[in-house]
Amino acid sequence: MGHYFFFSYARLDLNRHVEKFFDELCAEIRSHAGVGEDVTIGFRDNLNIPLGREWETALLQALSDSATFVALCTPSYFKSHQCGREWALFHERLAAFASAERPPVMLPLLWVRHTKLPAVARQVQYATDQLGARYPKEGLLNWVRRGFHQRRAEFVEALAEHIIQAKERYDLPPLSTTDRFESVISAFKSADAAFSAPAIPDPVIVTAAPASPVAGKATVRADKGTDQKARTVNFVVAAGTLTQMRDIRRQTEYYKDRDRDWEPYPHATPPSLAMLASQVALDNDFGARIRTIEELPGVRETIREYNELVVLLMDAWVTRSASKREAVQRFNDGAAARDVVLVPLNEEDIETYLEWRALKTEVLTLLEPYFTEVGEHRPLPLPVQDLTAMPGQLLRALVAANNDLFREGVVRRWLPGDDDGDLPFLSAPTK
């Protein structure tokens, strides 16, 4: 019949207080549910895995059959890759639940007060009137350690009733597979080893040598009180519209009626990634144009002729859209070493964060021709997670790409004279 709850905690926090709370919760559930001693109420790894049984198999099975997920939130908990993987796997079951409204079965409990919650945990309600108004401010550990029996009893009773009702009301699907654990990306740590090389391009943008404006087209430029021509960056958006993405993923609040208005960081100013990147370019004496991935083939020849830059702003989810995949493949066909790809990863976008391991593989496969063209001379940065660092990273990339253009760009105006003459060079002193 499965466990009533999976008890997720950091090994560093395990002590008699944690054990006491676990035992009290199991006893309360057993009493209210009216089940016998033959039924295992809560799963706790060091308690429920028999000696000699493969721990990973038992852990995955419990994550697959538990009705709820009780997480003991402490600073140590959110630093634990093990706990982050447990959270990610249970959330995977929650994401597969056949309802638009997510059932309240993930139950993060503030064990240590003032614990800083990562974005993925802040998405889950951890304080309710049912559990008491004082608990979020004081933390459960204080109640257990100081002997506040009445407060603790009321809290455990309310929690037990919630867990029983959740088990009776919601039928979560099991994990789609139970043959992995260490390969799962932690839901808490963006610096998890799973995000290491080979990495996906970060906010890197390309530079051009000073370019002549394209005839008949206005060039956007920053007003710096100088008559220097702006170098132009073409920000090419590879993302779906709201209508297109509804068939591909659940969280669609990042998409708009136009694909160029894609907002992977909706709290940024401005929220559109293309506008945000363009502002960085404008603030540093570059020009900026915003295009879509479908427009690129028609203008690429002109972009190359006038030493303009191409920055692909790519949503990882376009790997699951046939039309967008084809458009990115056309980008690959004409890719140059000075072109750059930016693939955002917003840790508050829970669906993308939990699906990142699969999406990353799909992105790397789709962009393999681009990576081959870029070669080894420019390291491939990690996905963009820290938005505050983006302007500096972007500017450094512009400088690096500018060097590439001085070596490989199109010469727009040759020096007068005989083209067949020897090139001038400096000679060393004779004495």
Image (cartoon, rainbow, N blue to C red):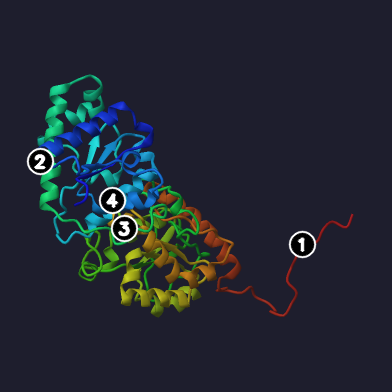
Secondary structure at badge 2 equals loop
Q: Please, what secondary structure does the residue beneath circle 1 have?
A: loop
Residue type (three-letter) at the residue carrying disc 3: Thr
CA distance separating discs 1 and 4: 72 Å
Q: Nearer the viewer, mark 4 or mark 2?
A: 2
Please determine whether, in this image, residue 297 is positioned above or below residue 383: below
Location of residue 72 (image quadrant): top left
For the residues labelled 1 and 2, the Cα–Cα distance comes to 94 Å
| Circle 3 or circle 2, nearest the eye | 2
Asked if residue 128 shows in the view, the reply is no
Residue found at x 68% / y 77%? 417
Between the C-alphas of marks 4 and 2, the distance is 23 Å
Kindly identify which residue carries mark 4. 63
Q: Earlier in the sequence, mark 1 or mark 4?
A: 4
Dot 4 surroundings within 10 Å: few (below 14), some, or many (20 or more)?
A: many
Please give the label number shown on residue 352: 3
Q: Is residue 345 above or below residue 341?
A: above
Q: Tell me the SS state at disc 3.
A: helix
The residue singled out by tag 1 in the image is 426
Q: Amino acid at mark 1?
A: Leu
Q: Which residue is mark 2?
A: 34
Residue neighbourhood size for the residue with mark 3, other residues' Cα within 10 Å, grouped as few (<14), some (14–19), many (≥20) = many
Mark 1 vs 3, N-terminal side: 3
Outermost residue, top side: 146
